[in-house]
Image (cartoon, rainbow, N blue to C red):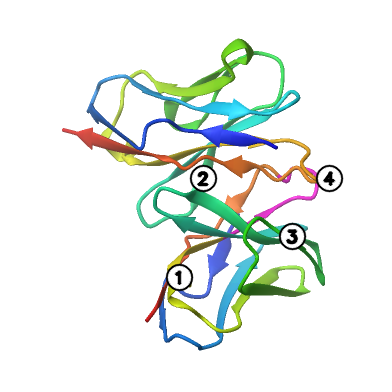
Amino acid sequence: DVKVTQSSRYLVKRTGEKVFLECVQDMDHENMFWYRQDPGLGLRLIYFSYDVKMKEKGDIPEGYSVSREKKERFSLILESASTNQTSMYLCASSTREQVWEQYFGPGTRLTVT
Amino acid sequence: AQSVTQPDIHITVSEGASLELRCNYSYGATPYLFWYVQSPGQGLQLLLKYFSGDTLVQGIKGFEAEFKRSQSSFNLRKPSVHWSDAAEYFCAVGGESGGSYIPTFGRGTSLIVHP
């Protein structure tokens, strides 16, 4: 069974802290994605990566960065967390050829106080 | 630019009743269309997809969707809803956008099922 795991289900951080959200997939997928999910706004793409050490900005990259040192792992970094980054963060992966068929992790609910 | 509209934020149905969730898209060429479901506390799961061919597509869990090009719609249907279908449903459209095929998601429709 395919699997995308995220390091934490719930996370509480303080304003100004550096936050790392980790995502691991075991499907040998080339593509990985980070989305932010907010009520009434649906899913918005933050960053994606189509290969190791490669990244592309999505629709809302401001305030975020990413790292992909290994194929199976994709990290989302909040350099200095702010309260408006309180949200649900979803990681996903896909094959290179079927970028639209994405497999999602369970999400990390981040609260910044 | 591609976009997806899900006009209903919430839908309430009784268990056993039929269901239709609406989705309208905007896309300049033939779209790839998808429905995802997010059960409480879970990530999203692909229900079904349309690329081309037969405009009525079957998915998992007894769901189906019909592509209507003239109406720019891809509505999701189920003839008899079960309590376990209560979830958030997302429509998505994919296609070439700035050189990638990453889908754009709608804002979601929350399905509430009454016993």
Instruction: Read off the magenta span.
Output: A91-99
- Residue depicted at 83% across the width and 45% down the height: B99
Tag 2 subunit: B
- Location of residue B103 by image quarter: top right
The answer for which chain carries disc 1 is A
Which label number is shown at residue A84?
1
Q: Quadrant of the C terminus of chain A?
A: bottom left
Residue B32 lies, in percent from the top left, at 68, 30
- Does mark 3 fall on the same chain as mark 4? no
Q: Amino acid at mark 3?
A: Asp
The residue at the point 68 percent across, 42 percent down is A100
How far is mark 4 from mark 3, CA to CA?
Answer: 23 Å
Q: Position of residue B68 (x, y in %)?
A: 58, 14
Check disc 2 and report its element: helix, strand or loop: strand
Q: Label 3: which residue?
A: A28
| Disc 3 chain ID | A
Q: Which residue is mark 2?
A: B45
Q: Nearer the viewer, mark 1 or mark 3?
A: 1
Say few, some or many: other residues with alpha carbon within 10 Å of mark 1 (under 14 / 14 to 19 / 20 or more): few
2 or 3: mark nearer the eye: 2
The residue labelled by disc 4 is B99
